[in-house]
Image (cartoon, grey):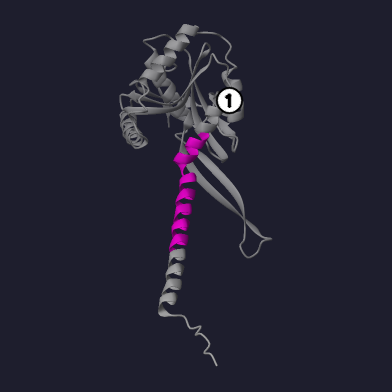
Amino acid sequence: MGVAPSTKATPISAFSKFSKIQIMVIVFIVALVAISFYIAKVNSPQYKGRRGEARISKILEKLPEDYVTINDVVLSTKSGTTQIDHVVVSKFGVFVIETKNYRGKIFGNDNREQWTQLIVTEVTYARKWYKTYTYVKKSRLYNPVKQSLGHAYHVENLLKSHCDVKVVPIVVFTDSSDITNVDSRYHVVYSSYLLSVIQGYKEECLSTEQVQAISSLIDQNNVRKLVGNSAHVRNVQASLQNKQNKISAGLCPNCGGSLVQRQGKYGTFWGCSNYPRCRFTTK
């Protein structure tokens, strides 16, 4: 009678199985970490901002051929650099566009230093699917109107030796936000209205040659290739500190004029004495 072969695992096969389990666990952990990093990157403010800018770039491509669009412009300033999402040059003026890829409700006006973003979400309980609770997330963002006016000021400074041109600041929010609670005398619009705002300017103030010359001048002064994001962030931080120091000394951080107390729709505020040439305000 023959002897049945033993089914008992040898030490080598047991070790092999253990090694495979270890490898699978390691691969799973690495994949989980990679996915976590990817989700964090996609949801980061920088990545969201780039997505919003790309979306607005696509919209601006629909403008007629005689409109020149320059994206991601970084200009040197006395205090460092300033970054402008989009500049559109046309016979009807120069438009500087600040893009905000936000969702939720946005609250703000021209004079407030900080605006408020409010995201209200209905969340379902994990163990009671029929019950929900309201989760409210409140965030602050620097006044984009002030930001856009600063961009317009620097573009005007760049062009003033070239020609006297109308520079129009525009703040554009993607349609996932609600800006019905924003009160501004400037253009603060949804992305779906951006083209109609730009093309709403009908009075020609520049010739075709001037449009080309201004576009070339902005291109020549665009230092984006020389200045990375981290360097720009450091410049912005230094600029904000310098701005605060000037305000504390009673000086306009944009043009150096004196700050004068004025009465407005929302109470008292400080404005530049060189208004309307300079429209800087602060609380």
Q: Residue pushed farthest bottom?
A: 1
In percent of width and height, residue 99 lies at 50, 31
Q: Is residue 191 above or below residue 129?
A: above
Count of numbered tags: 1
Which quarter of the rendered picture does the C terminus lie within? top left
Tell me the magenta residue range.
26-52
State whether the magenta stretch is mostly helix, strand or loop.
Answer: helix
Left or right: 189, with 163 as reference point: right
The reply to whether residue 30 is in sight is yes
The residue under the point 55% across, 15% down is 65
Residue pointed to by mark 1: 194
* Disc 1 element: helix
Q: Quadrant of residue 243?
A: top left
In percent of width and height, residue 85 lies at 46, 28
Q: Is residue 207 above or below residue 17?
A: above
Q: Residue pushed farthest front?
A: 1
In percent of width and height, residue 16 lies at 43, 72
Residue type at mark 1: give it. Answer: Leu
Q: Residue pushed farthest right?
A: 130
